Amino acid sequence: MRTEIVETSYERPDAAVLDRAAEAIRRGGIVAVPTDALYVLAADPFNLNAVAAVFRAKGRESHLALPILVDSIEMAEDYAATPLDARFYQLARRFWPGPLTLIVPSSSKLPLKVTGNSGRLAVRRSDAPIAQELTIRLNSPIIATSANVSGQPTCSSGIDVFGTMDGRIDLILDAGAVSEAPATTLDITEPEWKLIREGALTRRRIEDFLEE
């Protein structure tokens, strides 16, 4: 596979570049894009060939879930098992769009393979214009797992992604360097919430907010 890299603006991405990336995803391809928390691999979560290709590109074990990005709380509701816990709405309204991934029960609309066969959905709304525009253009959530080979360092620039993923993915949208901090991941599927990974959003901020 030949990996192409295309430069664009982070704040004002070129419409033609976004259209090209959206079309690649529709065709089952994998596109690396910048978010407000590192670069991610974007793909169609409803295309099982694309899902399998993401696992292969990363060398990721199949029992691990693939996070998705949505464009709104309403889109998250469409693919989560409802009714959602009140904490979901509290946290999403406070910290979305932003670097917080929430783990919630998944609905049957999403392929079980995306959840790592766990039935749990890792979902986030990004503050990055490119990621938001792609979900809007596709009118669908997109897979958004870190753009790196599993076990290797994460990537905060398009050039970093190219050095790691060349030949493994179809396209890279290079918008320069982004935050080197990953998104914070919080599991709210149980009565007691659990911090899976502390990233750009600290445990203390979450604790202070929920205590309020």
Image (cartoon, grey):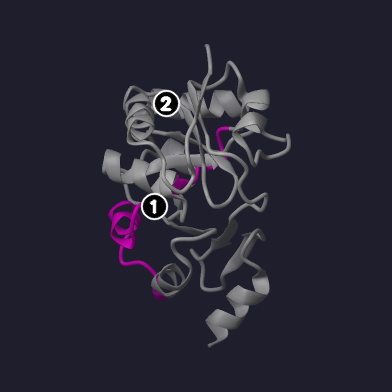
- How crowded pointer 1 is (Cα within 10 Å; few <14, some 14-19, many 20+) is rated as many
**Residue 177 appears left or right of 20:** right
Determine the main secondary structure of the stretch shown in magenta.
Answer: loop
Q: Residue at x 48, y 20 (%)?
A: 170
Work out whether 28 lies above or below 181.
above
Between 53 and 30, the residue placed more toward the observer is: 30
Could you say which disc has been placed on residue 153 in the image?
none
- Identity, as a three-letter code, of the amino acid under mark 2: Ala
Q: Is residue 187 magenta?
A: no
Q: Amino acid at mark 1?
A: Ser
**Which residues, given as a range, are shown in magenta?**
62-86
Q: Earlier in the sequence, mark 2 or mark 1?
A: 2
Q: Position of residue 169 (x, y in %)?
A: 52, 22
The reply to whether residue 117 is in sight is no
Residue at x 67% of width, y 32% of height = 160
What percent of the width, then of the height, locates residue 37?
A: 58, 51
Q: Which residue, given by chain and number where applicable, does mark 1 sit on? A: 106
Q: Secondary structure at mark 1?
A: loop
The residue that mark 2 highlights is 50
User: SS at mark 2?
Assistant: helix
Q: Is residue 92 left or right of residue 194?
A: left
Residue 151: image location, x then y, percent: 72, 35
Say which of marks 2 and 1 sits in front: 2
The location of residue 186, given as percent across then percent down, is 56, 62
Q: Pick out the residue farthest to the top.
A: 1
Tags 2 and 1 in contact by the CB under 8 Å rule?
no
